[in-house]
Image (cartoon, rainbow, N blue to C red):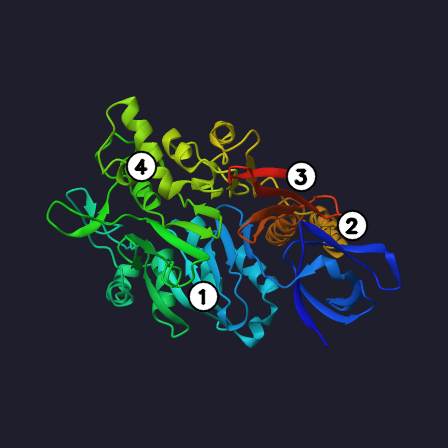
Amino acid sequence: MTLIRYAKGPVIYLYDKDNLRTKKKQLLWGDWLRIGDPINDDWSEIRWGRDEFAIRNRDFQEERLLEMIFLDVGQGDGCILTMPQVGSREKIVIIDAGVGSNMNGYLKYRFKDFKKKFKFHAAIATHPDTDHYKGFQPIFDNEQISFEHVYHNGIMERTGSDPLGPVKKGFLTDIRPTNASARRLYSRVAVRGGMQYPKLMWTALSSDRFDDVSMLSTEHGQDEDGSTWMPGFAPSNQADLTIEVLGPVVERSPDGQKGLRTFGSNINSRSMNKGKTKNGHSVLLRLQYRDFSILFGGDLNSPAEHFLMRHYGNDGQAPTTLADTKRMIEKSRSRFAVDLMKCCHHGSSDVTDEFLEATAPAAYVVSSGDNESHVHPRPDLLGLLGKKGRGFRPLVLCTEILRSTREKEDPKLRLKLDRLVKKIQKETNPVLKSQLLKERAKILDELFKRNVGVYGAINLRTDGHKAVIAFRKEKPGLSRWFFYELEKDADGVFQVKDVG
């Protein structure tokens, strides 16, 4: 008989079946377990992969947790959100996928039954920046993978003089909220051109593996209780776990059309900045699981944050006094205050103090890249997060810093490189030597990826009453997880508690 159970937390150990005093493997709270026959009243057999161990009966539980993996996707964002429901009710959502193949590779590792086909609940491309959506392309191309929903922010990049669509009186009015409206635009090859975002969306729009491709915004979702929710995650659907859509905010332009306002290079600029506009209208989500809350901040910037604070905290008006600003921050906290925040725009310093004061989480996750020119996360921003975060020691966790163990060099690859270097030294034919140099460059690039570009992940596990944030230690060993616990204080507010 095999029972499906989950590890208790924050960490537990598996033991040698033949020597119950010997620890063999450390597991994190919520890890999936296959429990076998009982050994005695206190112990049971457990299979982990091809190996068999022993586990204390007190170290596993029946309840599944809400799990998030903030994956180091290189430059960009990528998060895998696994809901606590089991069986046919299981829902897995991917929020952004970075620019490269890391997300695709991780999914292949995590969901090994791709060969049997696998259907995800949703893919959310928060906005049309390559470091958020391009990593979806190999996933969408995989014939074994399908999605119930693909959500976007309504801004459809295209060829021509208006890359985000026509601008009328400071608004983008050609948003494409439905599957049909997006198909009408992207069915024209000339509109797609050679651009990557249209290619990705057309992959989803033109395949029967994707049930729905649509916009997610304050106007496009499930309306309930005066708010907009991600479809299927409104309070009436499952009161324990809700996902509210806080952005993009759809408005009426001066001529009455629904659209998204343009953002300038700063809060005082009236001319549209393409990057600020598409980033500022990221799909902005607030997830609440029982008592624990998370904000997914996309690539918000200071003009967008100023707008959102006024929209939610001051009836759309700019505050004129310090007292007005304080009231605006306090009112907007009802929508933005959270326990953990996926930091906006990879740790860019283009943020506002007011927005950070409204969110005031106990922990931040900063997703930033390798070998990039943006200097993310910015040192001044990290200091500001610590200053504005909740408690005496708010957590600031960065995917680029918290990497997994450095891989060992492939001895065969090293031997091949050594032999190639000797050939290059002896070769006199310029053409052949050039070919050998190109081959050497490929091997060096592979060695770099394996030895420097090592990718890690930040794990969040919560039952809605407490939470554990964990990442792998760089030096391998029996104790492989470093973790923090978040628990409610006497006032019912989550604070950082223990360090593992």
The residue indicated by pointer 2 is 478
Q: Residue 303: horizontal and vertical position, in percent?
A: 31, 35
Determine the CA span between mark 2 and mark 4. 47 Å
Q: Quadrant of residue 17?
A: bottom right
The residue that mark 1 highlights is 121
First in residue order: circle 4 vs circle 1: 1
Residue that appears at 42% across and 34% down? 356
**Which label is found at residue 499?**
3
Tag 4 and tag 3, C-beta contact below 8 Å: no
Left or right: 23 as drawn, with respect to 398: right
Query: Label 4 to label 1, Cα distance in Å?
Result: 31 Å
Residue 20: quadrant of the picture: bottom right
Pick whichever, 372 or 395, lies toward us: 395
The answer to which of marks 2 and 1 sits earlier in the sequence is: 1
Disc 2 and disc 3 in contact, CB within 8 angstroms: no
Q: Position of residue 298 (x, y in %)?
A: 41, 46
**Closer mark to the observer between disc 2 and disc 3:** 3
Of 341 and 491, the residue lying toward us = 491
In the rendered image, the vertical position of residue 337 relative to residue 159, given as above or below = above
* SS at badge 1: strand
Asked whether 197 or 46 is in front, the reply is: 46
Q: For the residues marked 4 and 3, what is the alpha-carbon distance in whole angstroms?
A: 34 Å
Name the residue type under label 2.
Leu
Residue 193 can be seen, yes or no: yes
Residue at the spot 48% in from the left edge and 73% down from the top edge = 143
Please say whether residue 300 is visible from this viewpoint.
no
Mark 4: which secondary structure?
helix
